[in-house]
Image (tube, grey):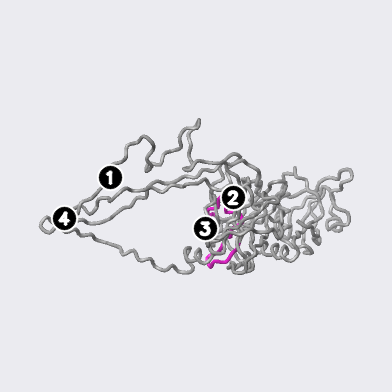
Amino acid sequence: MTSEHGSSATGWSRPGGADVLRDPWTVRPGDSAPEPVTTTSDDPWAVVGPTHGWRDGHSPSRTARRGGVYAQRDRRPRNRALLVTGTAIALVAGAIGAATGTYVANRVDDQSTGTVTVIGADPAVVAERPPDSVAGVAAAVVSSVVSVSAGPATGSGFVISSDGYVVTNNHVVTPAGQGPIELGFFDGSTETAEVVGRSPSYDLAVLRVDRDDLVPVVLGDSSDVVVGDPVIAIGSPLGLESTVTSGIVSALDRPVTAGGQGETSFINALQTDAAINPGNSGGPLVDAAGRVIGVNSAIATLGMGVNPGNIGLGFAIPIDQAQRTAEQIIATGEAVYPVMGVRLDESFDGPGARIDADVEDSPAVTPNGPAGEADLRPGDVVLEVDGRAIDSPEELIVVLRIQEPGDRVTLVVERDRELHEVRLTLGSAVG
């Protein structure tokens, strides 16, 4: 979702091209060799030989998606649409030096016998994890999650059929243009994928690889999700494949508007505090039974120019919507979404969403469209859709996108300071 600038191996550099931060366990030219550390038989706690630190030998992968989520002004207790806007982001990856260990023991020296007694020793037997634990769920799902490399962008995806279909975000694959898209699988293999189709409106894409031995995820039911349900996010944040984080569903029906490269997506999102970072985009959000309930797509940031690391606000496309869109793409190569047939006034600050004024050769209400047939007019303000309050133009679009073309909805509309109830049948558009 975001992009990053190159960094040093350790992730830190000094101004003016100075040396990168030293790994304290690396000998530089001109340094004297360290004295070897040895032990004798009467000191069982001494370190034998040199200790080596772990270093991160590469910079994290780049993603072309740029964005932060900003809340619109909220005049009422209802949620305003969250807007994802373009931002240049620099990400920094760090490495930890040598591993350390702590020993808790009761050491008793007996000068006459030379014995040492250690109390509380653990045989370090690894117990089997329950299938409904985070470890159990991760073990069951991680083999169905893939990393996606599309030109300058990287992200995640998940297998939905054994014969090679994979779901990811549209914004993950868009930067590739006509270039190759590579999928990395849990077993270490890689495959070049083709784009079956994509939906910028819902920020979804379906890919396919020429394999018939893949293990698909189990899809859940996002309509059954409630606030507080435990969830697990799996993906490749910052290029770190098979990363697992956990949390809860922290809100439902959060209207999120994501934009980039001339395309805008409208998401009626599941909100989660599970850690989601750039590169998680397109990966699955799963419930405690390992069923996919959402597609991780957006994260909130604190503002323009702020590093987009996790701050406990991530957003996922509900799997009910993602499944419907993926099935359309697989069947026809494209997806459709519902429309009212109006042009909205983007400058209107709510509450509600106002139909724009007519301009020359561009009517705000499409003739013979759904809104026109329902006698909606320029200047009308839509305050409710099927009982759900509307607080902004973006929120109206998000709420309509939950529906399907052909669905009939009831609107509460303000016109000349009077309220009217209007019923209309939604039309359709491709995208």
Would you say 307 lies left or right of 43 here?
Answer: right
Residue carrying label 4: 109
How packed is label 1: few (under 14 Cα within 10 Å), some, or many (20 or more)?
Answer: few
Separation (CA) of disc 2 from disc 3? 19 Å
Viewer-nearest residue: 228 or 176? 176
Name the kind of residue labelled 3 in the image: Ser
Name the kind of residue labelled 4 in the image: Asp
Question: Residue at position x 50%, y 32% from top?
Answer: 17
Separation (CA) of disc 3 from disc 1? 38 Å
Q: SS of the residue at dot 3?
A: loop
Q: SS of the residue at dot 4?
A: loop
Q: SS of the residue at dot 1?
A: loop
28 to 248, vertically: above or below: above
Residue carrying label 2: 299
Q: Where is residue 75 in the image (x, y as percent from the top left)?
A: 66, 46
Tag 4 and tag 2, C-beta contact below 8 Å: no
Residue carrying label 1: 36
Separation (CA) of disc 4 from disc 2? 57 Å
Separation (CA) of disc 4 from disc 1? 27 Å
Residue carrying label 3: 242
Is residue 287 within the magenta segment?
yes
Residue stretch in magenta = 273-293
First-in-chain label (4 vs 3): 4
Between marks 2 and 3 in the image, the one whose residue lies nearer the viewer? 3
**Which disc is residue 314 wearing?**
none
Q: SS of the residue at dot 2?
A: strand
